[in-house]
């Protein structure tokens, strides 16, 4: 919420999976996106700026920096830990969504 993170990456299958009642399962540049936490509380609003596919073995600097990592290796290690059910080999494709923060709704939420 401090604006450091400007990119998110997901598997192709997850990125294009339908969401909610009307979601078609993907975002395009210009889309306004509501971001919810794990308890379904609205936290912020972002605007998609770019979307493209990358390979896990070739993470561009703008992607690993945009995800707030210090290197491509740190990006890979974190995603391997977060997705242990997947075989994240060098040719595995991820979709990257670049975005800008539009509005913070709730920086901190009390229980």
Image (tube, helix red, strand yellow):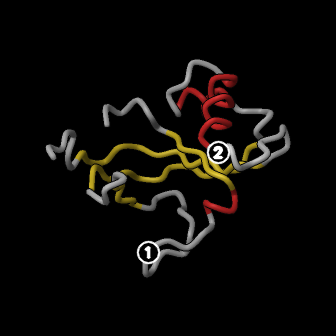
Mark 2 burial class by Cα count in 10 Å: few <14, some 14-19, many 20+ = few
Q: Secondary structure at mark 1?
A: loop
User: Residue 69, percent across and down?
Assistant: 55, 24
Q: Is residue 60 above or below residue 9?
A: above
Is 64 left or right of 107, judged from the image as shown?
right
Q: Is residue 74 above or below residue 45?
A: above
Residue closest to the far bottom: 21
> Looking at the image, is mark 1 or mark 2 nearer the viewer?
2
Please state the total of marks drawn on the protein image: 2
Residue at which label 1 appears: 20
User: Residue 44, percent across and down?
Assistant: 29, 50
Dot label at residue 32: none
Dot label at residue 83: 2
Q: Is residue 69 above or below residue 44?
A: above
Q: Is residue 46 above or below residue 3?
A: below
Residue closest to the far top: 70
Q: Looking at this view, is 18 or 30 the one in front?
A: 18
Q: Residue at x 55, y 73 (%)?
A: 18
Q: Residue at x 79, y 45 (%)?
A: 87
Q: Residue at x 61, y 60 (%)?
A: 15
N-term-proximal mark, 1 vs 2: 1
Q: Quadrant of the N terminus?
A: top left
How far is mark 1 from mark 2, CA to CA? 23 Å
Residue closest to the far left: 110
User: Residue 103, percent across and down?
Assistant: 26, 48
Please identify the quarter of the rendering in which residue 60 is found.
top right
Q: Are marks 1 and 2 in contact (CB under 8 Å)?
A: no
Q: Residue at x 61, y 31 (%)?
A: 78
Mark 1 burial class by Cα count in 10 Å: few <14, some 14-19, many 20+ = few
User: Residue 28, percent across and down?
Assistant: 54, 61
Q: Secondary structure at mark 2?
A: loop
């Amino acid at each position: 919420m401090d604006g450091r993170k400007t990119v998110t990456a997901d598997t192709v299958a997850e990125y294009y999976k339908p969401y909610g009642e009307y979601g078609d399962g993907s975002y395009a540049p210009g889309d306004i996106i509501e971001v919810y936490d794990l308890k379904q509380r609205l936290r912020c609003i972002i605007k998609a700026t770019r979307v493209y596919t990358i390979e896990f073995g070739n993470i561009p600097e703008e992607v690993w920096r945009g995800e707030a990592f210090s290197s491509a290796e740190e990006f890979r290690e974190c995603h391997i830990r977060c997705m242990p059910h997947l075989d994240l080999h060098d040719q595995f494709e991820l979709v990257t969504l670049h975005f800008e923060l539009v509005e913070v709704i709730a920086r901190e939420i009390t229980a």
